[in-house]
Amino acid sequence: MDIFCIKAVSLGDLEKVLISHDGAGPGSGWFLDKIVIKHKEGEEVQEVVFPCNRWLDEYQDDGKTERELTANKDGSLMKTFLKGKHCFPTIVFYTIVFPV
């Protein structure tokens, strides 16, 4: 599993995200487990989970390299795992890479 943390400006309340890649180069596809966006306002940390569990690969799954993901209103599954991370706001991509 690869985890990427990206510091970003506040994006407000998110309900959907669009993620894609251009498919350039051999083996460019990847499997996206979920996207987690954390935001801290004062002492309160908010977290939104966008489950995917699909390939972004023109040769796997349905062949799409773009996904529109809808927020899972219960992000409690990731709160324990990410507790203690102090880079806010943060976008975290959880990917599992499988050889093709």
Image (cartoon, rainbow, N blue to C red):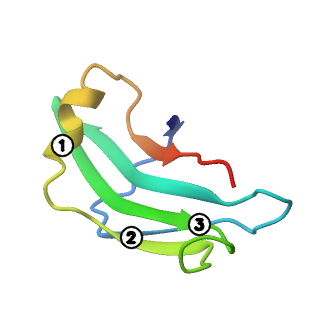
Q: Residues within 10 Å of mark 3 (few under 14, many from 20)?
A: many
Q: Is residue 4 left or right of residue 34?
A: right
Q: Of residues 98 and 33, which is closer to you in this image?
A: 98
Which residue in the structure is indicated by mark 2? 69
Measured from the top left, where is residue 5 in percent x and y? Answer: 50, 35
Examine the rendered structure and indicate whether residue 88 appears above or below residue 46.
above
Q: CA distance from mark 1 to mark 3?
A: 23 Å
Q: Amino acid at mark 1?
A: Leu
Question: Upstream in the sequence, badge 2 or badge 1?
Answer: 2
Measured from the top left, where is residue 54 in percent x and y? Answer: 46, 65
Q: Of residues 89 and 3, which is closer to you in this image?
A: 3
Which residue in the structure is indicated by mark 3? 56
Q: Of residues 9 and 54, which is closer to you in this image?
A: 54
Which residue in the structure is indicated by mark 1? 77
Q: CA distance from mark 2 to mark 3?
A: 12 Å
Question: Upstream in the sequence, badge 2 or badge 3?
Answer: 3
Please give the name of the residue rendered at 20% of the width and 35% of the height, measured from the top-left corner.
79
Question: Upstream in the sequence, badge 1 or badge 3?
Answer: 3
Please give the name of the residue rendered at 64% of the width and 68% of the height, measured from the top-left corner.
57
Q: Is residue 62 left or right of residue 70?
A: right
Examine the rendered structure and indicate whether residue 67 appears above or below residue 77.
below
Report helix, strand or loop for mark 3: strand
Report helix, strand or loop for mark 1: helix
